[in-house]
Image (spheres, rainbow, N blue to C red):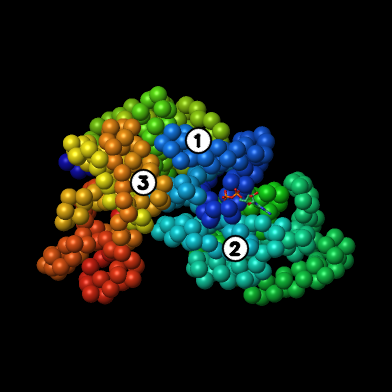
Amino acid sequence: MTNPIDNKIDKTLLPEIKKRRTFGIISHPDAGKTTLTEKLLLFGGAIQQAGAVKSRKAARAATSDFLSIEQERGISVSSSVMKFNYKDYEINLLDTPGHKDFSEDTYRVLTAVDCAVMIIDSAKGVEPQTQKLMEVCRMRNTPIITFINKLDREGLEPLDLFQEIEDKLQIECVPLTWPIGMGKRFKGVYNLEEQQLGIFTPGYTPKNDDGVLIKDLDDPMLDEMIGESLAHQLREDVALLSVAAEPFDIDLYLNGTQTPVFFGSAINNFGVREMLDAFVRIAPCPGMRPTATRDVDPAEAAFSGFTFKIQANMDPEHRDRIAFFRICSGKFTKGMKVRHHRIGKDIKIANATIFMAQERSNVEEAYPGDIIGIHNHGTIKIGDTFTTKEPLKFLGIPSFAPEHFRRVLLKDPLKAKSLTKGLTQLAEEGTIQVFRPLHGNMHIIGAVGVLQFDVTMARLKAEYNVNAGYEPIDLSVARWVECENESYFNDFIRRNESSLARDAEGRLTFMTTSEYQLGFTKEDWPDIEFHKTREHN
Ligand code: GDP
């Protein structure tokens, strides 16, 4: 039987698609993600007072035992997706958990967005977590808008920051605003496109019509407003930029090679509106998505989408899980029946949830770009596709190579079976990755963030009644291996048996102590492919 191709376009979907923006924020802890999120939600009217987002974070601070991990999940879940409106746009902001919440979910969320905002702390420049998240954005050439934050503090010179971004992140910076002074001398930003001057007053949120139009930078009004020396500096900077900086090119932005840059101070709500205005204007709406068989157009009438995150124990009363599902095409309506292709069954989505900034509500209808939460009892895995009919498999929702490893210690040997079952299911949900070395009988667990080890142990106990612990193991690198040449591959396996393991889906994985060691092995075995990510079955 040939598969039906269900790609009829429904033009009535277009206005809904065009007004949607689905994005995530990439930044290093403390660069200002929470603060910026809060300001965006304030602009969107999704929250009424400053501090609403902060208090969530404060509540997170004290977490050490199982109970607080549970509570923390309850808290972080409601903020996993924040939907808000701005002007005529419907914006989905997907949280990229950082700090000690950093996990594979942080990476995977970026597979479900269409664009991203990168925050850089002007004093610190490009930091490690930003670099890691940027690597993930690179995989799909996600368009990125940059916000350079904390201009009210002394920081690096803007051009030095650009150089660092270009060197470390391989993306070309194009300033759309330009800062005037910094730290105590910070006077505001000049909007290069609109030739408007925005004056900074600490503690005052600029209004839409506050900008002063200064078409000619030689206008003496500039000296009056920001002082002679800063006016002189601004004239020099702008003259330099006009020859040295590349012009903004929307296509280069959309394919991820150029990033428009905004300067500001999130805490003072300064420069944020300029960034948000540009964001809704230039950031892409939901677009084509690749599957194993064809590209799917968001305006196709048939519904489709994929699961990118699974969260358990939202409600301690019910041991159910919520699958976060990104709609890729068609319209979702409450109670609709969809095909769950991996298990080959139709399921009715009766009580999907849509996530507003501070609450969850039952969703009646949703469109491409929207994220809905689907309740289930362990039948949904990361990467699962649901459609109305056609068996599609969306690509680019991979597992990411773990960076931390532990060996699992089972305290009650009679529970070996339950342990395997529990670990397998937790691996399917993306909580942890599980490896069985070719030699020996142990379980090695791997994670992108170390909090996952405690979460895993707590859930093994609570959900599978397994008392387990873990101990360090001298590993820090894992790569999935493949090779087209069978006899070469077999030779590789024979000679490296002690460094090989199978993951929960049976994929062969090479594990070693350092990147350095990995380099040696790669040199010795040039025909083996070592993958940092792998697609789900
Ligand atoms: P996150 O870890 O990225 O979510 O960062 P937060 O939003 O929590 O900010 C980290 C710290 O930087 C907090 O103390 C904020 O008050 C502070 N902060 C955020 N934006 C600014 C800013 O524009 N200027 C200054 N001086 N501090 C800021």
Q: Nearer the viewer, mark 3 or mark 2?
A: 3
Q: Position of residue 239 (x, y in %)?
A: 72, 73
Dot 1 or dot 3: first in sequence order is: 1
Q: Is residue 385 left or right of residue 275?
A: left
Callout 2 amino acid: Lys
Callout 3 amino acid: Phe
Q: Is residue 124 left or right of residue 374?
A: right
Q: Is residue 408 above or below residue 172?
A: above
Asked which quadrant contains residue 213, the reply is bottom right
Q: Nearer the viewer, mark 1 or mark 3?
A: 3
Q: Position of residue 206 (x, y in %)?
A: 75, 48
* Disc on res. 453: 3
Q: CA distance from mark 1 to mark 2?
A: 29 Å
Q: CA distance from mark 3 to mark 2?
A: 30 Å
The residue that label 1 is drawn on is: 75
Callout 1 amino acid: Ile
Residue depicted at 62% across the width and 71% down the height: 160
Q: Position of residue 182 (x, y in %)?
A: 73, 63
The residue that label 2 is drawn on is: 124
Residue depicted at 55% across the width and 37% down the height: 59
* Callout 1: CB less than 8 Å from ligand 1: no
Q: Is residue 187 left or right of residue 79?
A: right
